[in-house]
Amino acid sequence: MQNVKSFFKTLWSDESGQGTAEYVLLIAIVVALAFAFRGRITDAINARMSDIEGTMGGFSTQ
């Protein structure tokens, strides 16, 4: 019984994979937000590209 108790105590205090799990969770949240707001993100990017296109049309190469 002491071995089992010792095993779970060691397992509970082991934090070797904690950083990786946090990064995976953070990436999953960012991807979920990107999917949730993809329409608004696409609209914002398209508006920016239109602004850049209009600005570039005003420049002359000569």
Image (cartoon, rainbow, N blue to C red):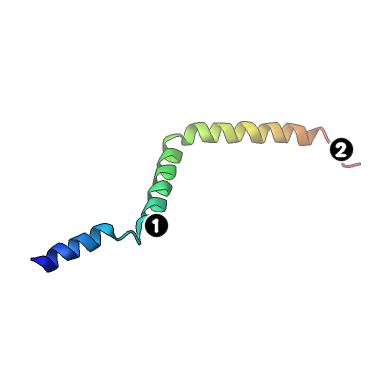
The mark that comes first in sequence, 1 or 2, is 1
- Quarter of the figure with the N terminus: bottom left
Q: Nearer the viewer, residue 32 or 5?
A: 5
Residue 61 place in picture, x, y as percent: 87, 42
Res 4 quadrant in image = bottom left
Res 7 quadrant in image = bottom left
Residue 10 place in picture, x, y as percent: 24, 63
Left/right placement of residue 28 relative to residue 6 reads: right
Residue sitting at 77 percent across and 36 percent down?
56
Res 14 quadrant in image = bottom left
Which tag is nearer the camera, tag 1 or tag 2? 1
Q: Which residue is mark 2?
A: 60
Reply above or below: 36 against 15: above
Asked if the residue at tag 2 contacts the one at tag 1, i.e. Cβ–Cβ closer than 8 Å, the answer is: no
Q: Nearer the viewer, residue 12 or 23?
A: 12
Left/right placement of residue 15 relative to residue 8 reads: right
Left/right placement of residue 1 relative to residue 41 reads: left
- Which residue ends up furthest to the bottom in the rendered image? 3
The amino acid pointed to by label 2 is Ser
Callout 2 secondary element:
loop
The amino acid pointed to by label 1 is Thr
- Disc number placed over residue 20 in the picture, else none: 1
